[in-house]
Amino acid sequence: MIKVKTFGMAIFLVCVHTSALAQKPQAASTSTVTQLSAPLNIDRMDSDRPAFHVRNPRYQLCKDDVFDLDFPFSPEFNQTTTVQPDGYISLLGLGDLHVEGQTIPELTQSLRVAYAKILHEPVITVVLKDFDRPSFSAFGQVGKPGKYDLRGDITVTQAIAIAGGLSDMAKHSQVLLFRRVSSDWYGVRKINVKQLLRGENLDEDLHLQPGDMLFVPKNTIAKIKPFIPMPNVGMYVPLP
C-alpha cells in the first residue's frame, strides 16, 4: 500500500509540473501582447498633440473688423457693426453678442439663432467691409525683416524672397516656421531652405497661412565673428 501511495504522489507531482510548464508559454504570450500594444498607446498620445492646420482655413473675426448685416425681408434691422475690443458686437433689437474668433458661416448661424427670438426664420447676409488683412512676418537674418501682406498662394522660399532674401549671416538649413494651431498653442517647423534652393525636398516648401512667422537664425560664423581678431586690432569683445 505504501508503494501505491508513493507512486500516486509521483504521478500527482508530475501532473502539477507539466501543468506549470504548459502555462509558461501562455504567460510569455500575454507579455508579448502587452509590449506590442504599448506603441498603440503612444500613437494615441501623439494624436492628442496640436498639429498644423489644413490649408485654406476660413477667416476668423478679429477686433475692429467691420461688416454689414443685411435683412432682405426685414430691412429695418439692416446695420453696420464693428467687433469691439472685448470681442462683442451690438445688434439692433437684441443687444450684445460675442463673435470674435467665428468664421462668417458661424457668425451667420449665430445671428440667425439670436434673431429667431424676435423674427420668424430670419434671413441674414453678412458682408465683411474692413478686416485684418492676411499677412505673414519674417524676422532674423533676412534682407528686410517685417510684416508683409499675404497675397495669393505663397511658399516659404517665396516669402523669404519677398522679405529681401537671406543675409550672409543666415543659417539656411534651420529656418523656423511658427504657426498658431489653437488659441493656446503655436506649432514650429524647422525647414532646410538650403536644400530647397538646390531643388531638393521641394515638398518641404510649405504654403504659408495668415499669421505665419518665419525666423532665420544666425549661422555659426556670424555668432563667433564678433570675437574673431581683426588685423591691427587684436582680440576684442562687443561693447556692453
Image (tube, rainbow, N blue to C red):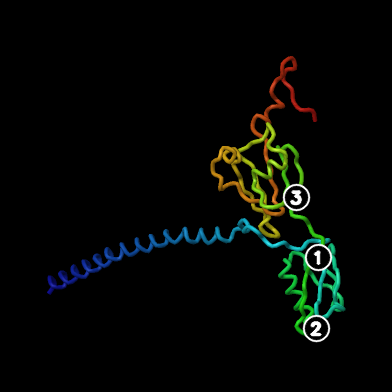
The picture places residue 37, in percent across and down from the top left corner, at: 44, 61
Whether label 2 touches label 1, CB < 8 Å: no
Q: In this view, does 196 lie to the left or right of 133?
A: left
Residue 172, compared with residue 109, is above or below; it is above
Q: Earlier in the sequence, mark 3 or mark 2?
A: 2
Query: Label 1 sits on what residue type?
Result: Gly
Q: Which of marks 3 and 1 is nearer the N terminus?
A: 1
The picture places residue 150, in percent across and down from the top left corner, at: 72, 51
Q: Which of 200 and 229 is in front in this view?
A: 200
Whether label 3 touches label 2, CB < 8 Å: no
Q: Is residue 16 left or right of residue 203?
A: left
Q: Which of 24 and 51 is in front in this view?
A: 51
Q: Which residue lies furthest to the top in this view?
A: 232
Whether label 3 touches label 1, CB < 8 Å: no
Residue labelled with disc 1:
87
x 65%, y 59%: residue: 56
> For residue 191, what is the image quadrant?
top right
Residue labelled with disc 2:
119
Image quarter where the C terminus lies is top right
For disc 2, the neighbor class at 10 Å (few under 14, some 14 to 19, many from 20) is: few
The picture places residue 185, in percent across and down from the top left corner, at: 67, 56
Residue labelled with disc 3:
149
x 66%, y 44%: residue: 158
Q: Which of marks 2 and 1 is nearer the N terminus?
A: 1
- Element carrying mark 1: loop
Q: In this view, does 105 lie to the left or right of 74?
A: left
